[in-house]
Image (cartoon, helix red, strand yellow):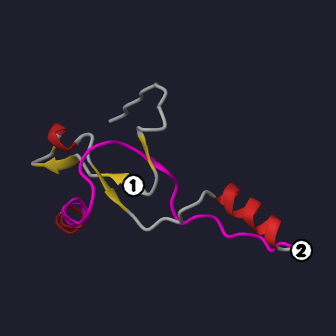
Amino acid sequence: MTCQARTSYTEDEVLWGHRFLPVMSLEEGFFRVDYSQFHNTFEVPTPPYSVKEQEEKSSLTSPNPLPVAPAPSSPVLGNGARGASAHQDSESFFRTH
């Protein structure tokens, strides 16, 4: 299944350090989409600054800056549920599906 969308986002719609909750599952040979979770996200460990900002800070504080490792995850877009319960729901989904 392929889904494409084009849009632009305002800064209020971009959630740094979030991922979408899973919405698709395979049940009895058919894909099921849970639209009630479509906009929900959960937090993931993410540095507070982008790689670019980390590099800029590093170059200002060090005469010979060392390379900065890339962030472990990229910014994620979404709205809705945040926090531990959403994260736990996602973890249980991945364990059972």
Which dot, 1 or 2, sits closer to the camera? 2
SS majority, magenta: loop
Assess whether residue 86 is covered by the magenta stretch: yes
Based on the displayed image, in which of its 4 quarters is residue 53 positioned? bottom right
Q: Quadrant of the C terminus?
A: bottom left
Where does label 1 land, which residue? 18
Number of the label disc, if any, that sits on residue 52: none
Q: Secondary structure at mark 2?
A: loop
Give the residues in magenta: 65-90
Up the image or down, 1 lies above or below 52; here it is above
Q: Are marks 1 and 2 in contact (CB under 8 Å)?
A: no
Q: CA distance from mark 1 to mark 2?
A: 33 Å
Based on the displayed image, in which of its 4 quarters is residue 44 positioned? bottom left
Q: Secondary structure at mark 1?
A: strand
- Residue at position x 73%, y 64% in the image: 57
Viewer-side residue, 62 vs 78: 62
Q: Amino acid at mark 2?
A: Asn
Residue 90, x across and y down, in percent: 24, 61
Q: Amino acid at mark 1?
A: His
- Residue at position x 47%, y 31% in the image: 9
Up the image or down, 32 lies above or below 21; here it is above
Where does label 2 land, which residue? 64
Viewer-side residue, 68 vs 56: 56
- Residue at position x 83%, y 72% in the image: 65
Residue 94, x across and y down, in percent: 24, 64
Residue 30, x across and y down, in percent: 15, 42
Name the N-terminal-most of marks 1 and 2.
1
